Structures are given as structure tokens and as C-alpha cells.
Image (tube, rainbow, N blue to C red):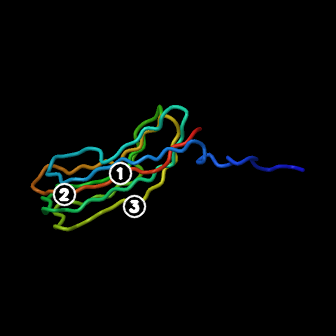
């Protein structure tokens, strides 16, 4: 008999010592703010499947030239930071304009950093942000 796949009861990597990952935040930001809504770095000897989400709603109309953004950024172990997906609102965006990043899935190796980040440019506008990362980490 020939076997063409792993044998035993632990055939799938996600089944080996899984750990749940949940990290996120929300809040309002006035002009000139930036930061991370959620981030996660994969520990040594582990891998992870992470889902990233982020969103914002304009609460006070943005000034001309003022921009609001939310994005998912991946920094691979030993590599440079790269934006995977970005959503933004251009200057003079009206109240209640929204943008979101829904459930972007990323597979990571040890040492990789994934972040959901936000920024709102200097000006009179205010924006409410929210987002984070969720997923599962498992043995490599």
C-alpha cells in the first residue's frame, strides 16, 4: 500500500498546539494622529494564519487636503514593511463617509509582524477608527 499524505490523527498543521490570537482597538482621533489598531508578531518556532480588519467613519468633515487612512502592513522577518491594502478618504470628505478593510487573511512565519494601522492628517476633521487582528498560531 502507498500513502500519499501524512498519516495519524494530527494531519493538519493548524491542529498542532493552536493558540488563539486576538488584538485590536477603536477610538476617535482628531487631525494629526496616527498609530496601530492591532499588531501581532509570530514567535520563534511558530506559524500563524491571521485575519486583519480595519475601518473608519468621518465624524467631523475633513478639511481640504486632510486625508484619513487605514491599512494592513506586513513586515516579514528580515524584510521591509509593505502595505498590503489601504483604504482612505480624501480631503473635504463629508461627515459619515466610511471605508473598511474586511477580513484580509495573511499566513505568517516566525518573526513576521502584521499590523492594522491608521492615520489622519493635520486639520479640523475628526475620524473614528477601529480594527485589529484575529487568528490562530500553531507549531511550525
| Marks 1 and 2, how far apart at CA | 17 Å
The image position of residue 126, as x and y in percent, is 14, 56
Q: Pick whichever of labels 1 and 3 is earlier in the sequence.
A: 3
The image position of residue 134, as x and y in percent, is 42, 51
Disc 3 element: strand
In depth, the one of 127 and 8 nearer the eye is 8
Disc 1 element: strand
The image position of residue 110, as x and y in percent, is 51, 35
Q: Pick whichever of labels 1 and 2 is earlier in the sequence.
A: 2
Residue at left 33%, top 56%? 54
Left or right: 21 as drawn, with respect to 97: right
Q: Pick whichever of labels 3 and 2 is earlier in the sequence.
A: 3
The residue singled out by tag 3 in the image is: 102
Left or right: 8 as drawn, with respect to 62: right
Give the class, few, some or many, for how many residues have Cα within 10 Å of label 3's Cα (few <14, many ≥20): few
The numbered mark at residue 132 is 1
Tell me if label 1 and label 3 are in contact, CB under 8 Å: no
Residue at left 82%, top 49%? 3
The numbered mark at residue 32 is none
The image position of residue 115, as x and y in percent, is 37, 45
Residue at left 14%, top 49%? 122
Name above or below for residue 97 compared with residue 20.
below
In depth, the one of 92 and 119 nearer the eye is 119
The numbered mark at residue 127 is 2
Q: Count of labels shown?
A: 3
Give the class, few, some or many, for how many residues have Cα within 10 Å of label 2's Cα (few <14, many ≥20): many
Amino acid at each position: 500500500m502507498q500513502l500519499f499524505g501524512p498519516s495519524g490523527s494530527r494531519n493538519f498543521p493548524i491542529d498542532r498546539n493552536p493558540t488563539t490570537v486576538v488584538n485590536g482597538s477603536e477610538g476617535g482621533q482628531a487631525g494629526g494622529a496616527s498609530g496601530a489598531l492591532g499588531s501581532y508578531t509570530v514567535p520563534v518556532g511558530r506559524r500563524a494564519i491571521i485575519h486583519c480588519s480595519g475601518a473608519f467613519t468621518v465624524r467631523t468633515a475633513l478639511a481640504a487636503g486632510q486625508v484619513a487612512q487605514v491599512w494592513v502592513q506586513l513586515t516579514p522577518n528580515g524584510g521591509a514593511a509593505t502595505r498590503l491594502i489601504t483604504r482612505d478618504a480624501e480631503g473635504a470628505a463629508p461627515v459619515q463617509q466610511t471605508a473598511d478593510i474586511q477580513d484580509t487573511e495573511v499566513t505568517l512565519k516566525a518573526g513576521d509582524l502584521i499590523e492594522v494601522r491608521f492615520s489622519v492628517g493635520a486639520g479640523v476633521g475628526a475620524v473614528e477608527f477601529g480594527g485589529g487582528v484575529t487568528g490562530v498560531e500553531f507549531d511550525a
